[in-house]
Amino acid sequence: MFFILCVLAALISAMFVASVISTVTALRREQEEMKMLVERSRQF
């Protein structure tokens, strides 16, 4: 029983870490896209 609870806790924590990593990568992509848009608007 204790082993099953440990495995479930490990899975939940792994999913949490994965969601945090995906959120951070998405934010970085948005920042890069905003920089590109700003550079394009400066060219015009």
Image (cartoon, rainbow, N blue to C red):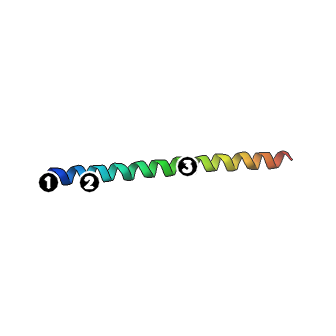
Q: Among all residues in the image, which is located at the extreme right?
A: 44
Q: Is residue 22 left or right of residue 35?
A: left
Name the amino acid, label 1.
Answer: Phe
Q: Is label 2 in a helix, a strand or a loop?
A: helix
> Viewed as shown, does residue 12 lie left or right of 35?
left
Which residue corresponds to the image point at 53% horizontal and 46% vertical from the top-left? 25
Q: CA distance from mark 3 to mark 1?
A: 36 Å
Q: Which mark is residue 26?
A: 3
Crowding at mark 2 (Cα within 10 Å: few <14, some 14-19, many 20+): few
Which residue is labeled 1 in the image?
Answer: 2
Dot placed on the residue nearer the N-terminal end, 2 or 3: 2
| Residue bearing mark 2 | 9
Instruction: Identify the disc placed on residue 39.
Output: none
Question: What SS does tag 3 mark?
Answer: helix
Percent position of residue 30, x then y: 62, 50
Q: Look at label 2 and name its amino acid.
A: Ala
